[in-house]
Amino acid sequence: MKNNKTKDFIIWTILAIVLGLFCSFVFLPMLDVNPITAVSIMFKDTFSDTFTIGNIFIKTAPLILTGLAFAFTYKANLYNIGAQGQFYTGCICASAASLALGGKLPGVLVILIAMICSMLGGAMVGFIIGFLKARFNANEFLISMMSTYVITFMMQLLLRTVLQESKHEYLKTDYLDSSTWLPKIIPGTSVSFGIVIAVIAAVGCWFLLYKTSIGYRIRVTGMNQEAARMSGINPKNQYMIAFAISGAIAGLAGLVEVNGMQHMLLTGFDTDIGSYGIGIAILANAHPLGVIPAALLFGFLQVGGTVLGHASDAPASVIDLMQGFVMLFVLMSFFFRRKIELRRLKQQKIAGEEAV
Amino acid sequence: MSNIINLLTRAFFMSTPLILGALGEVIAERTGMMVTAVEGIFLIGAWGGFIGAYLSGNLVIGFLVAMICGILVAMLYGVTTVYMNQHQIVMGTAIAILTTGFCTFFYRVIFGVQTTPLKVETLPVIAIPFLSEIPIIGPIVFSQNIVTYLTYLLVPVIFYVLFKTSLGLTLRSCGESPEAADAAGINVRQVRFLAVAVAGCLGGVAGAYYSLCNVGMYTSEIISGRGWIAFGICFLGNWNPVGALTFGIVFGISDAIGVYVKALGLAGLPSELFSALPYFLVIVLTVCRKQLKVPEKLGVNYIKEN
């Protein structure tokens, strides 16, 4: 029975993804781009050389983490739509730590410190949101949404003042010392250790949620708050724990992006990584391990879209179009899958009654 | 003194779209539907309004196109949440991503690549005779554009409809107790769907306000979270049109202060903190303010049992 369900889920999701991509390519002729050529460019050129394939993994690493951040709170029936802000907090902490200590301490040690800083920073923001929810019953998604904007402006302020590059020309930091860069793991590409961190985080989340008592409490709170309270679990504590962990994961994405990819902090980068995370978590049905293939898909769409933009007249906005349509159809597929499942159950029941 | 008057005039000017969006949100949320697609609705309103106005050369047509675009996006949201029972917050995010891509893509399709941004004339200010000559209040309140005046008229109208008519009772019952409303013969899903469409209509106009009244052009960053502020205003205003008006003005003021401080360009002043003020204010006010009139079934989809 359970296998059947998983099979249904995969079939329907793939169907939805194909339909979503189809819908976005239908519009391409308006810009004199042949959709069929576009598809072949996207698949052929993206997988033609290792460097471009590597780019997919680079894009995927932070996406896995922001996807996990949303999925984690989702399990507690909470909505952390402020992963963007926690991601930026992680970026600020990671770059500040790496700039301050880079070159003075061994690189590995600096990376470890930056990692802890970024996670603590993100966890702090998450914890505040969870605390406001628990203590004042404030609406968590409104607050988390707003926190993103506050943090974005904070980041601009910091980049204009204390963190600004020594030339004081642009709103960005100096390059990080190369000893603090995450090591590259595949030669010939720029794939960094970040993808490994992301996959470990996904497995860790899965373990935490399904194999430990902390995860059990969080999931019970998510499924039925009253039942959780009756059995001695304080839902309010779970809010704070879930939000803090979720924030820490999003903060870690900041480290992966800053130390692994950008090697500096600048304004207005990855402005949608938080909302993509939500899409990825939904695509994965909020399962921590499912987040990995879902993030790979989004990573592929982003790299493929960029490749397409270079090779033809298709604009970069087609990436958002693809991601939006895919999300929309995946959500719709949930409805149809549920409907079919219900019909099947009904038929089974009727068959059962007839047998009696 | 004239500085303060200018600032407040600007504040009232900037509060209009927030109030409009929040009013739509109030109507929808009273029926139990959080229109989390509000950010997307604002964006497509700004986009549709600009395109309509630019191609026709007529601002009225621009606003009509914005309304239609807003309604269409709201209907997409309505179909998936009301009739297909998908989660409201998640759906809102999906629609936000989709509209971002859609607007940028079709702006390119329609106008191609432009080196300088295309512009339209912004909506003119109509100074109401006599009233606009009252000292202080005159220039602030009675020298605004027509959309602002209509928004202020809409507040008592919506208040009356929501709380004094049977239509209002129908709307509110769908948010408080959909089962009871259903038993009383109200088609809960239909009511919710239509309420979302109304919110989309108002949100579309609110979005067009940014492109047609504020800057006279369209960029993809034109909304940048203001839809979410309208969403927050609805919460802070206790799901009441008058509350939406009050908090709309508060946020208009904080928005105007942010723009003003940035324009001053004083090096020592952290202008970013002032720009963050409206967003920070939502957090503080959400925490401080007791929310008394939360519609009972807000955000909960109604699934009829057979």
Image (cartoon, rainbow, N blue to C red):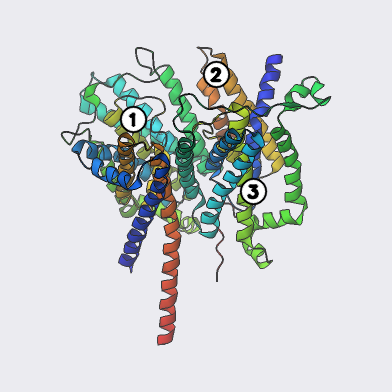
Residue B14 visible, this angle? yes
The disc placed on residue B279 is: none
Which residue is label 2 attached to? Answer: B262
Dot 2 alpha-carbon crowd within 10 angstroms: few under 14, some 14 to 19, many 20 or more:
some
Report the Cα–Cα distance between label 1 and label 3. Answer: 46 Å
Distance (Cα) linking label 3 and label 2 = 35 Å
Q: Residue furthest left?
A: A187
Asked if the residues shown at circle 1 and circle 3 are in contact, with their CB atoms under 8 angstroms apart, the answer is no
Q: Which chain letter matches label 1?
A: A
Give the residue type that dot 1 points to.
Cys
Q: Is residue A196 in sight in this rendering?
A: no
Residue B120: x and y, percent? 59, 28
* On screen, residue A100 above or below A136: above
Please identify the quadrant where the C terminus of chain A is shown. bottom left
Q: 10 Å neighbourhood of mark 1: few (<14), some, or many (≥20)? A: many
Q: Residue at x 66, y 42 (%)?
A: B23
Direction from residue A223 to residue B156 in the image, left or right: right
Q: Chain of mark 2?
A: B
- Residue labelled with disc 3: B198
Residue B263 placement (x, y as % from top left): 56, 17
Image position, residue B306 (x, y; %)? 55, 71
- Give the labeled residue for mark 1: A117
